[in-house]
Image: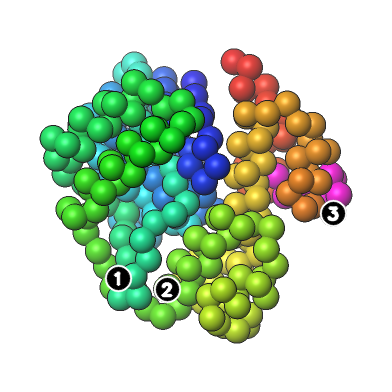
Amino acid sequence: MISSRPISSHSFNDFVIFNYRHTDMSAGSPYHYLAYMREGYGRIEAAGIELDLVPGDFFYIPLGLPYHSYWKNSGMIRFDSFGFSNFPLFPSHTYPLQRISPSSQTLALTEMLYQNKAPSYRTLGLFHLLLDSVLPSMQTSPVSSQMNAVLQAEQYMAQHPEESMPQVARHCTISESGLYAAFRAVRGYPPVFARQKFLIEKAVALLSSTDLTVDEISLQLGFHSTTYFRRIFMKHTGKRPMDIRRERML
């Protein structure tokens, strides 16, 4: 069971998985994620990195990262997941996939959020205190100019997925052809694919938290037809929109 609580550019979840699950996120992570393992074991594989996880581990997954995750236990796998779109961007470095050593403050804030993830300003305040508590201990890696452009574009598109590619390029102070070249070099897919990914993530949140029809959601997100929206939705999630809505009822 997955209990999701989308809050605009945030998505806080309690994940409960039984026995074994493989999650294919080769399309790229739709958010930055901080997560805390409570029960069970996991492995995240991305770009030659293998991150093994045990109960008590804190870990970070960067937005846009293509990865596969594997979760296993003889019984229950349980972890807290805090998804967010906004993250500090620096011209010289970024934050890679990593395990984080939590401080006592981090663990205390995690428990406070675990008790109450319902959407509120207090919840967001607690989360940003949590993020502030882990940043000083997080590892960084150098970033190229192309990576910097991709990170800026992804963060902007996560907040404004309806924007056109020329608008995204202008925001990142790069040409449209340069933006496409950067995405091809860094992600292996064009920025349009990333834009679709963020739109579908919004669609999933709307399907999970509102009673809007599929036609209404398609129109709200700027798709020119519901048929096209359904095709893109299946491409990015492997499911139909109504599958997501049925899962909400479980």
Q: Secondary structure at mark 3?
A: loop
Q: Counting residues from the N terminus, which is met first, the one under dot 1 or under dot 2?
A: 1
The dot on residue 148 is: 2
Residue at 29%, 26% (x, y): give it. Answer: 112
Left or right, residue 220 beside residue 32:
right
Residue 208 locus on image (x, y percent)? 62, 29
* C-alpha gap between disc 3 and disc 1: 38 Å
Residue 137 locus on image (x, y percent)? 17, 53
Q: Secondary structure at mark 1?
A: strand
Q: Type of residue at label 3? A: His
The dot on residue 93 is: 1
Q: In terms of depth relative to the viewer, which is nearer, 39 or 94? A: 94
Q: In terms of depth relative to the viewer, which is nearer, 186 or 120? A: 120
Residue at 79%, 52% (x, y): give it. Answer: 223
Which residue is denoted by mark 3 in the rendering?
Answer: 224
Left or right, residue 105 beside residue 126:
left
Q: Which quarter of the picture shows residue 117?
A: top left
Q: Counting residues from the N terminus, which is met first, the one under dot 3 or under dot 1?
A: 1
- Please say if 246 is above or below 239: above
Q: Secondary structure at mark 2?
A: helix
Which quadrant of the figure contains the C terminus? top right
Q: Type of residue at label 1? A: His
Q: Which residues are magenta?
A: 224-233
Q: Are marks 1 and 2 in contact (CB under 8 Å)?
A: no
